[in-house]
Image (cartoon, rainbow, N blue to C red):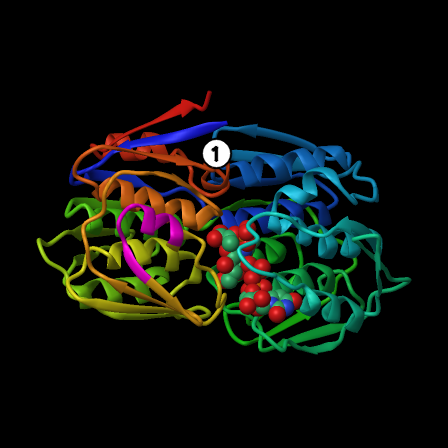
Amino acid sequence: MEKLMVRGGRPLRGTVQISGAKNSAVALVPAAILAESEVVLDNLPLISDVAVYSEILQELGAKVVRSGDTMRIDPSDLQAKPMPNGKVKLLRASYYLMGAMLGRFGEATIGMPGGCNFEPRPIDQHIKGFEALGAKVTNEHGSIHIYAKELHGAKIYLDVASVGATINIMLAASRAKGSTIIENAAKEPEIIDVATLLNAMGAVIKGAGTETIRIEGVEKLHGCRHSIIPDRIQAGTYMIMAAATRGDVLIDNVIPKHLEALTAKLEEMGVGVEELDESIRITGAPEYSAIDVKALVYPGFATDLQSPMTTLLTQAKGVSILSDYVYGTRFKHVPELSRMGANIRVEGRSAIIEGTRLHAAKVKAADLRAGAALVVAALTVEDGVTEITGVEYIDRGYDRLVENLTSLGAEIWRETES
Ligand SMILES: CC(=O)N[C@H]1[C@@H](OP(=O)(O)OP(=O)(O)OC[C@H]2O[C@@H](n3ccc(=O)[nH]c3=O)[C@H](O)[C@@H]2O)O[C@H](CO)[C@@H](O)[C@@H]1O
Ligand SMILES: C=C(OP(=O)(O)O)C(=O)O
């Protein structure tokens, strides 16, 4: 097992290039199996979730070739194989195989997804969507079996604006007979990215990015080339790291609009934020004010930045309150930050954070963003080396993290645990 070693206390300085978005990539790769010819994806992040997904597609019979940041997926020989176990358990987004296989073959058997289980993450809205499209869904020994003689369009109101359910319904409905309307759809930028790819493949989807999405089903989808949007969560994490180390960093290849909620909160604390066309410059300040933050669905403050933000708030003067209204118990980073000296109390869906200096410790990442929170913390520590285990979670979503931080002047390296 690998661990990350960090000797902190150095302000980050320089420029970091942001890769394509994990949450787009893990939907676009399975979306490609709906095509009858080759799909080429550019700006793909180098993360383990994408590597695992490409192996899953190969197990299903697709030809997948990755070269640098580009992946070519030829799904012509794909088979409708059941995937009850194995690699589907390694990532959350394996649930997109349900919608994609259903759209392509009219059936799918997929094990319940794995990935970051920071709290129970139901998929009832995905299932409700498949059933509305005419599928029969059963749970067989922990695998979801979905079958439809014919998929037909439907009007589907989502009880919660779920990212995964919205995308899964788009995937299946793009091959259904007739029109589908998703009401109370999620509005995250990654949903627009998936709709853009599907439309380039010949689908007819309107309204992605709003709460009402209309999909006209088509008989066939074809190959195309598509470039993935920048990863707003990785970008946000570097913005937080730059602020926490009182550095000066240009975060490049981003869409600043996707980061508006974070930008507003950083400015409220006293962090310098300059928005440029495709980059954001963060300039740290000696002192930050305590603030309150509420994680909400997009365009609200992203829950995926809640954990790293918790760490930044330990560097503010006074008491901050950070509440998560998407995942109300996503606080596995808190006990680990406490080992590093943080003064944080969790009450219901809120963390109450009192500013303090952090010190080096041996800590464990319990999930992807909890891991990011620990890296932010380790970068602020002025003496000693912090050891972070659970690196496999961090590798799910951060493209070339050690290389990027090293180029910004951080002392960070990997060691193999004996
Ligand atoms: C691969 C991917 O894109 N992952 C992201 C996606 O996860 P994911 O798609 O799993 O998250 P959802 O948007 O579905 O979840 C939002 C909320 O809805 C609830 N819910 C969801 C589905 C359902 O069928 N029933 C239900 O009750 C969840 O428990 C949660 O409280 O969006 C989350 C919220 O922005 C992010 O943290 C994840 O990084
Ligand atoms: C929770 C996350 O991802 P996933 O849904 O893939 O587990 C995340 O990216 O923070």
Q: Is residue 54 left or right of residue 381?
A: right
Q: Residue at x 55, y 50 (%)?
A: 116
On the image, the x and y values in percent for residue 123 come to 67, 63
Residue 115, relative to residue 15: is it above or below?
A: below
Q: Quadrant of residue 5?
A: top left
Q: Position of residue 347 (x, y in %)?
A: 40, 70
The foreground one among 403 and 113 is: 113
Q: Residue flagged by tag 1: what amino acid is it?
A: Asp
Residue drawn at x 22%, y 35% as measured from the top left? 408
In the displayed orientation, state which residue is furthest to the right.
149
Residue 184, image x, y percentages: 58, 78
Residue depicted at x 73% and y 35%: 62
Residue matched to label 1: 69
Q: Quadrant of ligand 1?
A: bottom right
The residue under the point 66% across, 33% down is 55
Q: Is residue 304 above or below residue 155?
A: above
Q: Position of residue 228 (x, y in %)?
A: 48, 47
In the image, residue 117 sits, relative to residue 38, either above or below, namely below
Region rendered in magenta = 335-344
